[in-house]
């Protein structure tokens, strides 16, 4: 149950804190999307550290969890750039907001190692 609560907390806090972190930077264009992926991964890891202290049944994440979150966020970000190369993805990705994929990728990446 603790892991499920952690998953939801990471999605909600990651969404809000990711926007706050990226708003403090001056990046534009594709680099701004990269900053979102990094911010989502960092927030997922930090929320995991805090939740490990507060929630029962949640283990303390290792640095490998941060690396996995960064990789997952990067994979989610890479999917956004695939429609020109794989036209079948265009209708699917048109229904999904761009920043959901890096956030979900970062959180799922975190949970593969935590």
Image: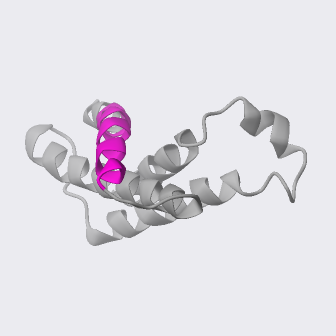
Q: Position of residue 107 (x, y in %)?
A: 42, 48
Residue 23 in magenta? yes
Identify the residue at image location x=15%, y=37%: 55
Quarter location, residue 61: bottom left
Task: Say whether residue 111 is left or right of residue 29.
Answer: left
Q: Position of residue 47 (x, y in %)?
A: 23, 47
Quarter location, residue 39: bottom left
Identify the residue at image location x=72%, y=57%: 81
Identify the residue at image location x=83%, y=41%: 90
Identify the residue at image location x=18%, y=53%: 49
Q: Position of residue 28 (x, y in %)?
A: 51, 58
The answer to whether residue 96 is visible is yes
Task: Say whether residue 84 is left or right of residue 36.
Answer: right
The quarter of the image holding the C terminus is: bottom left
Give the magenta range: 8-24
Tell me the chief SS of the magenta region. Answer: helix
Q: Is residue 15 above or below residue 105?
A: above
Task: Say whether residue 99 is left or right of residue 82.
Answer: left
């Amino acid at each position: 149950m603790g892991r499920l609560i952690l998953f939801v907390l990471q999605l909600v806090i990651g969404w809000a804190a990711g926007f706050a972190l990226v708003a403090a930077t001056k990046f534009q264009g594709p680099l701004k999307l990269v900053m979102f992926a990094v911010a989502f991964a960092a927030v997922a890891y930090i929320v995991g550290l805090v939740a490990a202290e507060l929630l029962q049944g949640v283990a303390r994440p290792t640095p490998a969890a941060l690396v996995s979150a960064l990789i997952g966020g990067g994979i989610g970000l890479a999917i956004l750039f695939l429609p020109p190369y794989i036209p079948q993805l265009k209708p699917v990705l048109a229904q999904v907001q761009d920043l959901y994929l890096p956030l979900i990728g970062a959180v799922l990446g975190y949970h593969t190692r935590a």
